[in-house]
Structure formats: C-alpha cells, structure tokens
C-alpha cells in the first residue's frame, strides 16, 4: 500500500509571504499525486494533480506543486499567500493500477496572519 | 455541477449501538469512497466501491460494513460504536475507471460522537 507523509502539522506565515508545504510518499511503482484543501467545517476540495509530463503542475488560486521522483516528494508552493489560504492541506497518492483508491497524508494546517 | 449529500450531519450514539451513515451523489460517478478523519491523523480509507453492488475494503474496514445499493448512494454502518469515539466521516466520489487519476469530490462530512 502506498503511504504519504506530511512532515509539518502546522505552518504559520504572514500575508504576502511565500509558503511551501511538504509531502513525501513511499511507493516504488507508478503513482498519481494530488493536493486538496479543507476549510474549517467543510469537505476537501481538489487543488491540483500530477499525472505525467512536466513535473511542475499549476493549480487554482496560484498554487503549484513539483514532483520529484528522486526525492519521492510532491511539495506544494504559493508565491504570495492571502489570509483566505488559511486551511488544512492534504497530499494524496494513488497507484496507477485499476481502481485504486487514494491514500491521504495527515494534513498540514496553514495559518496566514495579517 | 453536482453535489454530494451526507446525512445526518451530526450523529450521537451509545456504546455498542449500530449506526448508519448515508451518502448520495448526483454526479453520476462510478466510484464512491468512505474516509474517516481523526484530528492529527488525516483521512483513512474505510471502504470504496467502483460500481453498483461492488465493495472494496480499505485500510480501516474492521468494525464497519458498507453497502452500494445503487450508483448514486453509498452507506456506511458502524457495527458497534466505541465509547468516547469521536470522528468525522467523509464520503467522496469520482468518475472512476482506469488508473484512479480522477479527482475526488467530497461531501461535508458526518460528525460522530459516542457517549
């Protein structure tokens, strides 16, 4: 089974700062990687995914993530955060075989201070 | 656009009780999922279903049953609620098919508390 590790439980930055949320996975085969955002009291919403090709993928609201096979990582970045980006961010990994369900990391709570 | 509806939003049960959570989607998606969310532990996969009447066990299926009665609905049963258990159960759906590269759409969750 694939596993996902998000090393930072909490990250606090100021509005306008850049931020990187870390995600590492452990699986040797072919995978898909995704990031989701969860605002307080709501379900998760899709941000972006990596399937193949360009290792840097763009998502909504200025988020991007970079896949690195050598580091087994898929870190999420944003150049300039807004207070509304405060939320919990989840990384997910799926195996590239038939009908496999995504596994999620523990999540990183991002707090953006004014 | 579609929507995923989870009922009830809040569920309070007694120790040992059998409790059922329901999920409906109108995306016409093939695959549906149940995840359990505990504080600090992220989401853990309980069951998923790739089509009507199909069931696949996840990593946390012990203590749960699931039923995919029709394409649009997927229910989860806690077979015996544990005292002081507290968690949020999230239902999701996706188009499905080869490779599981499709994005998941989530409901707002059912918050379970066991007295």
Image: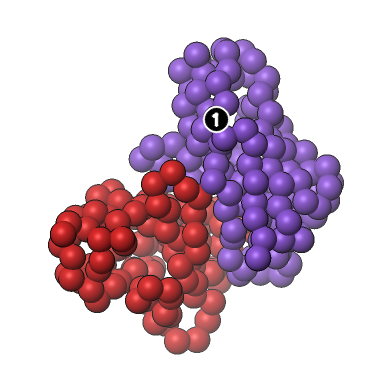
Chain colours: A red, B purple
Q: Please indicate whether residue A85 sits to the left or right of residue A113 in the image.
A: right
In the rendered image, the vertical position of residue B88 relative to residue B113, given as above or below: below
- Look at 47% across and 71% down and name the residue there: A48
Q: Residue at x 49, y 59 (%)?
A: A45
Is residue A43 positioned above or below A75 on the image?
Answer: above
Can you say whether B93 is above or below A19 in the image?
A: above
Asked if residue B51 shows in the view, the reply is yes
Mark 1, residue position: B10
Q: Residue at coordinates 18% horizontally, 65% vertically from top-left? A: A15
Task: Locate the N terminus of chain B by quadrant.
Answer: bottom right
- What residue is at 62 percent from the left and 33 percent from the top? B8
Report if residue B58 is visible in the image.
Answer: no
Residue A32 at x, y = what percent?
53, 69
Q: Quadrant of residue B51?
A: bottom right
Res A65 quadrant in image:
bottom left
From this view, report whether residue B85 is shown above or below residue B60.
above
Image-based side of A98 in relation to A60, left or right:
right
Residue A21 drawn at (x, y percent)? 29, 63
Chain at numbered mark 1: B
- Secondary structure at badge 1 equals strand
């Amino acid at each position: 089974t694939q596993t996902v590790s998000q090393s930072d439980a909490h990250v606090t930055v100021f509005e306008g700062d850049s931020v990187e949320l870390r995600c590492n996975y452990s699986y040797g085969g072919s995978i898909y990687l995704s990031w989701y955002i969860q605002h307080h009291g709501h379900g998760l919403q899709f941000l972006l995914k990596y399937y193949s090709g360009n290792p840097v993928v763009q998502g909504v609201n200025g988020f991007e993530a970079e896949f690195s096979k050598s580091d087994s990582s898929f870190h999420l970045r944003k150049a300039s955060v807004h207070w509304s980006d405060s939320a919990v961010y989840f990384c997910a990994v799926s195996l590239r075989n038939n009908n496999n369900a995504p596994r999620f990391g523990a999540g990183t709570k991002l707090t953006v201070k004014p | 656009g579609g929507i995923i509806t989870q009922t009830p939003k809040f569920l309070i049960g007694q120790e040992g009780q059998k409790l059922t959570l329901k999920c409906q989607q109108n995306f016409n998606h093939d695959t549906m999922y149940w995840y359990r969310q505990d504080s600090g532990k992220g989401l853990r996969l309980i069951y998923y279903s790739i089509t009507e009447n199909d069931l696949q066990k996840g990593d946390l299926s012990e203590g749960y049953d699931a039923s995919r009665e029709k394409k649009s609905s997927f229910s989860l049963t806690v077979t015996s609620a544990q005292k002081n258990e507290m968690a949020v159960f999230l239902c999701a759906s996706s188009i499905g098919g080869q490779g599981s590269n499709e994005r998941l759409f989530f409901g707002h969750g059912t918050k379970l508390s066991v007295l």
